[in-house]
């Protein structure tokens, strides 16, 4: 080739390369953000003619997007209402390419799109570089030498502190159930990559000094946020992705899942066994053999008649086996798998065409029971009219529930489950079976919204959870007790989670702690009832379940000593329900998790990154599980059973005890609200409340109460009772504060309550006890060194106890 031709080829390559890259970038499939560019957005044109957009959503939250063609995209989380969109106007000042808020400053470089962030509420200060790469992106966030990184969900179960490591953000059965493209660091900042395509987050592996976020196909779209500590970071993150759901109170009790081959007579006998043998239990679940077709992932499912019989003339009511279960305080849960196009309904909701089929449970059988959801844009109009006419005709004929169904794929997924809820089913388990699509990839699949599986795969379990939760809430006006093993960013606002088909153990503990670091609250795992270690971990986490699946692990087949250990742990959990429930309520308001990794609570101790099996349950309980030693953080602590005093920081051995499977310490100054253990939970309050107090230090707490079942708590219908203990020279002062609610609403207890207080770790019997200034007499336990005082029906204004 001549020099002239060679030079021409080089010049052509230089000219055509950017054009080709731009064309390739434009070929990336995008959802157009149809919302107008608001006053909170700053748009800059970069040197390569692409556009950079920064939306100031809050003083400490920024959304950053790059568009090669002037079209602003959104992810499925934005499109389908998972992420918060209605942000109030945030105050900021723009000075050229600099954006200033009360919490941060952002400076944009128009030459290459680099963004310099400086936090005013933490020590974070860094410059983000990179950008569009082919049809995807690659951006680099610098990391300081001592900077620690947490989050990423259940992407693996090997570490809590994620640096170094490279992580694939893609839902996978067993190996990565709930990956979340969110990370936060010890310097007071965090990020969330706003994509549902497969993406990667490299935390200091490729480059020890950088966190590199990349995707082969996705527009560059993400959020950057700041906070003074991890609590503040999770607060703003869950404002964006949704606050954690508050489960019905019974959801924090005990869930027992039967052997999958069980029939109704065996089920009823197991209900009686739990009550007669004094084992508290609230939820009993059925595995997939409850369906007439095993692993039925369609909307045509019905009961396996030979196992679970309902009179065809009266398939619901107190005369059914479900009605009998309810009378004994049990709630029935059904196992589900799914292979259904959930996105058709999401698009229908976006266009305002969605209709409710069957109305609300309170209006079942009335006029709106004849409404049929069909999409004229997708289904042939004549076909749609015919099917609607057929459905109305079938309702008029009073055909059984299962014969009223509209065509497969043409109704919202939850629609076909209403018939089971009407029969009394109150809970659902969302499994990742091989027949479903929650975690299993179906190459080449294209959904009704024209979304390809590579973009839909991560999003699918999130939308599944959303439709299950909102469907149940809309139909019953009650909270959903739905739990799933799969999910993505924002899952916490819809359902609880469990660790899937991985049992329990130390690795599962790591998984649950990583979910806590990623904004989730209501997580759990399976437990083995014949193993004290498994019981210890299983009963001291946000919610608890035992799954028999295909085995015969029922407690009544164990020896009496093992039965007693199981009973003791169950009663411990049921005593702790008001403490656990109050902690869950706090999480639903703030995003601060129930199950707290030690490095998040004690960030000044980087060595706690290695504490993979110890955590705080709420503010005051330190749990050690699946370990021979437990790390006790700084301060004064007491062993739960003996009140023995321990001063941290220290590391203590965990004895191998067949009756007690781990460590449990309570913080000095703790106030733990408890209830007397009872067979099942009937609401979000109890007529008898006992405050367990360790007055060896000052402390505060609160008693949280609501109706425990409905959605009214979201409107402020709950009550909080502040509690405080103060150590004095001669003893202590304990105060029950004024009962209060929100400004416009509160929960009013339906009956008088009897309060009591038990003081722990006392050096000697009190010589003087005053209740609201008057002498009072309590009970001294010389062996345990505890003192119990009945407070009676405490007035709204509260009361005061003085001990000398």
Image (spheres, helix red, strand yellow):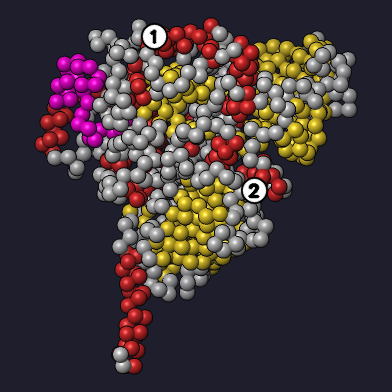
Kind of element beneath mark 1: helix
**Quadrant where the image shows the C terminus:** top right
Nearest the camera: 64 or 617? 617
Res 516 seen here:
no
Where residue 284 appears, x then y in whole percent? 45, 18
Q: Earlier in the sequence, mark 1 or mark 2?
A: 2
Where residue 339 appears, x then y in whole percent? 30, 36
- 736 relative to 357 in the view: left or right: right
- 136 relative to 569 in the view: left or right: left
Nearest the camera: 483 or 307? 307
Where residue 627 appears, x then y in whole percent? 67, 34
Kind of element beneath mark 2: loop
Magenta-drawn segment: 390-414
> Residue at left 64%, top 13%?
561
| Residues packed near mark 1 inside 10 Å, few (<14), some (14 to 19) or many (20 plus) | few
Residue hosting label 1? 265
Residue depth check, mark 1 versus mark 2: number of the one nearer the observer: 1
């Amino acid at each position: 080739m001549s020099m002239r031709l060679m030079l021409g080829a080089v010049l052509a390559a230089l000219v055509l390369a950017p054009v080709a890259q731009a064309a390739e970038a434009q070929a990336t499939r995008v959802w157009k953000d149809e919302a107008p560019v608001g006053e909170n957005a700053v748009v800059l044109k970069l040197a390569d003619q692409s556009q950079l957009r920064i939306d100031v959503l809050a003083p400490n939250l920024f959304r950053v997007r790059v568009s090669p063609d002037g079209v602003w995209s959104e992810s499925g989380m934005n499109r389908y209402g998972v992420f918060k969109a209605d942000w109030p106007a945030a105050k900021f000042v723009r000075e050229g390419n600099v954006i200033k808020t009360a919490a941060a400053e952002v400076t944009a470089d128009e030459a290459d799109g680099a963004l310099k962030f400086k936090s005013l509420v933490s020590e974070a200060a860094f410059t983000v570089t990179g950008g569009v790469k082919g049809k995807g992106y690659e951006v680099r966030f610098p990391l300081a030498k001592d900077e620690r990184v947490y989050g990423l969900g259940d992407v693996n179960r090997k570490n809590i502190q994620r640096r170094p490591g490279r992580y694939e953000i893609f839902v996978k059965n067993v190996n990565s159930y709930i990956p979340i493209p969110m990370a936060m660091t010890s310097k007071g900042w965090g990020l969330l990559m706003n994509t549902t395509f497969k993406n990667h987050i490299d935390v200091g592996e490729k480059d020890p000094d950088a966190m590199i976020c990349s995707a082969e196909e996705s527009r560059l779209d993400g959020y950057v946020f700041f906070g003074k500590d991890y609590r503040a970071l999770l607060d703003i993150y869950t404002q964006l992705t949704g606050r954690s759901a508050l489960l019905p109170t019974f959801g924090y009790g005990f869930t027992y899942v039967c052997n999958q081959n069980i029939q109704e007579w065996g089920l009823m006998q197991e209900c009686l066994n739990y009550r007669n043998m004094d084992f508290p239990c609230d939820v009993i679940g059925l595995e997939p053999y409850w369906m007439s077709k095993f692993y039925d992932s369609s909307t045509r499912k019905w009961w396996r008649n030979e196992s679970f019989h309902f009179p065809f003339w009266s398939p619901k009511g107190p005369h059914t086996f479900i009605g009998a279960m309810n009378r004994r305080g049990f709630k029935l849960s059904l196992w589900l798998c799914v292979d259904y196009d959930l996105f058709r309904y999401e698009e229908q909701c976006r266009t305002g065409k969605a209709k409710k089929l069957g109305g609300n449970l309170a209006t079942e059988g009335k006029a709106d029971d004849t409404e049929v959801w069909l999409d004229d844009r997708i289904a042939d109009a004549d076909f749609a009219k015919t099917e609607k006419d057929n459905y109305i005709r079938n309702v008029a004929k009073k055909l059984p529930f299962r014969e009223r169904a509209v065509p497969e794929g043409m109704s919202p997924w939850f629609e076909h489950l209403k018939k089971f809820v009407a029969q009394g089913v109150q809970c659902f388990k969302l499994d990742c079976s091989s027949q479903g699509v929650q975690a299993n990839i179906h190459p080449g699949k294209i959904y009704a919204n024209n979304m390809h599986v590579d973009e839909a795969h991560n999003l699918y379990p999130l939308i599944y959870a959303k439709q299950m939760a909102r469907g149940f809430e809309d139909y019953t006006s009650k909270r959903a007790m739905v739990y799933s093993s799969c999910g993505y960013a924002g899952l916490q606002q819809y359902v609880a989670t469990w660790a899937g088909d991985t049992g329990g153990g130390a690795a599962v503990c790591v998984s649950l702690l990583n979910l806590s670091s990623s904004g989730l609250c209501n997580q759990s795992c399976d437990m083995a009832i014949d193993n004290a270690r498994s019981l210890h971990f299983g009963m001291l986490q946000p919610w608890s379940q035992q799954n028999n699946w295909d085995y015969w692990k029922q407690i009544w087949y164990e020896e009496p000593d093992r039965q007693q250990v199981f009973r003791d742990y169950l009663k411990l959990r049921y005593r702790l329900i008001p403490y656990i429930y109050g902690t869950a309520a706090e999480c639903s308001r703030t995003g601060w998790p129930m199950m707290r990794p030690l490095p998040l609570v004690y960030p000044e101790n980087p060595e706690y990154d290695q504490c993979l099996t110890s955590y705080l349950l709420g503010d005051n309980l330190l749990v050690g599980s699946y370990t021979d030693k437990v790390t006790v953080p700084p301060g004064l602590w007491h062993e739960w059973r003996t009140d023995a005093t321990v001063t941290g920081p220290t590391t203590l051995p965990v004895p191998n005890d067949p009756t007690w499977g781990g460590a449990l310490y309570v913080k000095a100054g703790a106030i733990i609200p408890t209830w007397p253990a009872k067979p099942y939970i009937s609401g979000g309050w109890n007529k008898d409340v006992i405050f367990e107090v360790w007055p060896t230090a000052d402390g505060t707490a609160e008693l949280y109460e609501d109706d425990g079942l409905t959605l009214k708590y979201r409107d402020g219908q709950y009550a909080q009772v502040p509690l405080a203990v103060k150590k004095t020279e001669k003893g202590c002062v304990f105060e029950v504060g004024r009962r209060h609610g929100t400004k416009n609403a509160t929960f009013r207890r339906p009956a008088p309550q009897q309060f009591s207080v038990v003081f722990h770790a006392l050096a000697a019997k009190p010589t003087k006890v005053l209740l609201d200034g008057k002498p009072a007499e309590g009970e001294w336990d010389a062996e345990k060194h505890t003192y119990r005082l009945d407070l009676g029906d405490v007035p709204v204004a509260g009361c005061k106890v003085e001990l000398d």
